[in-house]
Image (spheres, rainbow, N blue to C red):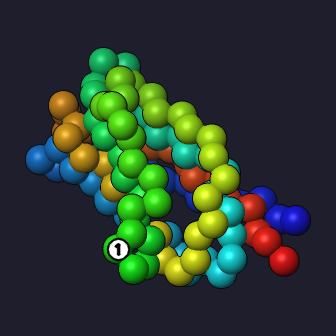
């Protein structure tokens, strides 16, 4: 069992930012951790798979930091998106996946 951390860093423009991962082959999404530069910034997050299916989306806007743990199977390229950000600033974080054999 191999565990990978995919680190992200980018600046939201007009309240949005997105990045695509490398192509996955049979992994499990285990954790999402996203953090805004300012502790009071609110934002939503969504992960979409290569077929356009939303595999994760926040139910409510996060404030400052979003941390979620789960076990969701993934395959192909995944888009990590931040939306409805109350400030155009830098977001950092990571997505943790576990390779399945």
* Depth check, front residue: 16 or 98: 98
Q: Determine whether 24 is above or below 5 in the image.
A: below
Describe residue 67's horizontal placement relative to residue 83 as left or right. Answer: right
Q: From this viewpoint, is residue 91 visible?
A: no
Identify the residue at image location x=31%, y=48%. 82
Q: Quadrant of the C terminus?
A: bottom right
Q: Determine whether 1 is above or below 43 in the image.
A: below
**Which residue reaches farthest right?**
1
Q: Position of residue 52 (x, y in %)?
A: 35, 74
Identify the residue at image location x=76%, y=69%. 99
Describe residue 93's horizontal placement relative to residue 42 as left or right. Answer: right
Q: Determine whether 19 is above or below 70 in the image.
A: below
- Residue under pointer 1: 52
Q: Quadrant of the N terminus?
A: bottom right
Identify the residue at image location x=39%, y=48%. 57
Q: Position of residue 61 (x, y in %)?
A: 31, 31
Identify the residue at image location x=47%, y=40%. 34
Describe residue 35's horizontal placement relative to residue 32 as left or right. Answer: left
Describe residue 101's horizontal placement relative to residue 50 as left or right. Answer: right
* Depth check, front residue: 41 or 67: 67
Indicate the secondary structure of the residue bearing disc 1.
loop
């Amino acid at each position: 069992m191999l565990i990978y951390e995919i680190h992200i860093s980018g600046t939201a423009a007009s309240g949005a930012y997105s990045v695509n991962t490398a192509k996955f082959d049979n992994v499990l999404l285990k954790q999402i951790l996203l953090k805004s530069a300012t502790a009071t910034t609110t934002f939503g997050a969504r992960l979409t798979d290569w077929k356009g299916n939303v595999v994760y989306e926040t139910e409510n806007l996060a404030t400052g930091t979003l941390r979620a743990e789960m076990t969701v199977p993934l395959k192909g390229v995944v888009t990590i998106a931040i939306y409805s950000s109350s400030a155009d600033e830098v977001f950092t974080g990571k997505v943790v996946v576990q390779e399945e054999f």
